[in-house]
Image (cartoon, grey):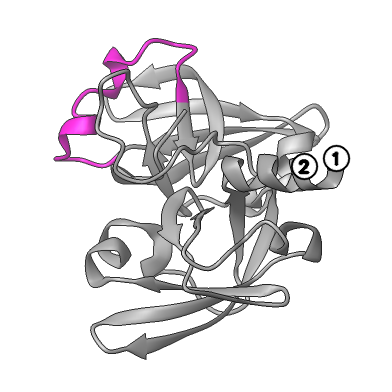
């Protein structure tokens, strides 16, 4: 489990196709100078790391990097299939019992892809509008939570298949929002609570 509070920006260092190109091995360089990533080699192999909202298993690690394998299913359902050398990646280690829950409960299981529609200045922050498939839009509610590329955000408004969030300068500086542009795809994970409430309504 994660909280959607990004602790560092990584960078894709290597991309190696596997299984005739169906799967992919990724080597991700970790940020320098941040305590959460001071010694990546100390993270045990098999540990989970959220990479732009996608929970991946670290299969090899070094002082400033880790490697993961992404299956064909993961590549088809997330933005990982579009990653190239130099792609910036939002990173988060799993939540430990007793840690501060600063965002909301995030599983790292991407529900689908969204598309950035627009980003416009809104006083001291930036208002982002993101379009999602109708099957996901029904789970997104005003003042509810949503994870966009692994970032826990509060929904401002929902209109059919689009929703809006505000990104403050700090969040933009420490996540991949600084490099996102209209038309870019993003990983979306809906709030687990919303999923179960909707399911209970279907059964009632």
- Up-down: is 118 above or below 33? below
Q: Residues within 10 Å of mark 2 (few under 14, many from 20)?
A: few
- Up-down: is 121 above or below 104? below
Query: Decide: marks 1, 2 in contact (CB < 8 A)?
Result: yes
Q: Residues within 10 Å of mark 1 (few under 14, many from 20)?
A: few
Across and down, in percent, residue 50 comes to 47, 35
Residue in front for this viewpoint, 116 or 14: 116
Across and down, in percent, residue 94 comes to 39, 26
Could you say whether the residue bearing mark 2 is in a helix, strand or loop? helix
- Up-down: is 130 above or below 135? below
Magenta-span inclusion, residue 32: yes
Residue on which disc 2 sits:
199
The magenta segment: 31-48
Residue at the spot x=17%, y=39% of the render?
Answer: 34
Image quadrant occupied by the C terminus: top right
Residue on which disc 1 sits:
203
Q: Nearest to the eye among marks 1 and 2: give it.
A: 1
Magenta-span inclusion, residue 39: yes
């Amino acid at each position: 489990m994660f909280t959607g509070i990004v602790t560092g920006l990584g960078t894709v260092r290597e991309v190696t196709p596997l299984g005739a190109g169906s799967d992919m091995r990724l080597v991700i360089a970790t940020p320098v100078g941040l305590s959460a990533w001071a010694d990546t080699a100390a993270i045990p192999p098999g540990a989970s790391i959220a990479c732009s909202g996608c929970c991946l298993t670290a299969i090899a690690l070094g002082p400033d990097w880790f490697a993961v394998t992404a299956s064909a299913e993961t590549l088809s359902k997330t933005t990982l299939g579009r990653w190239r050398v130099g792609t910036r990646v939002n990173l988060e280690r799993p939540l430990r019992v007793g840690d501060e829950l600063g965002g909301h409960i995030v599983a790292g299981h991407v529900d689908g892809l969204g598309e950035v529609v627009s980003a416009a200045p809104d006083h001291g922050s930036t208002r982002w509008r993101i379009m999602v498939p109708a099957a996901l839009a029904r789970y997104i509610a005003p003042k509810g939570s949503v994870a966009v590329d692994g970032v826990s955000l509060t929904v401002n408004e929902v209109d059919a298949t689009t929703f809006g969030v505000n990104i403050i300068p700090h969040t933009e500086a420490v996540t991949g929002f600084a490099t996102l542009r209209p038309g870019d795809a993003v990983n979306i994970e809906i709030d687990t609570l919303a999923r179960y409430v909707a399911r209970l309504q279907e059964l009632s």
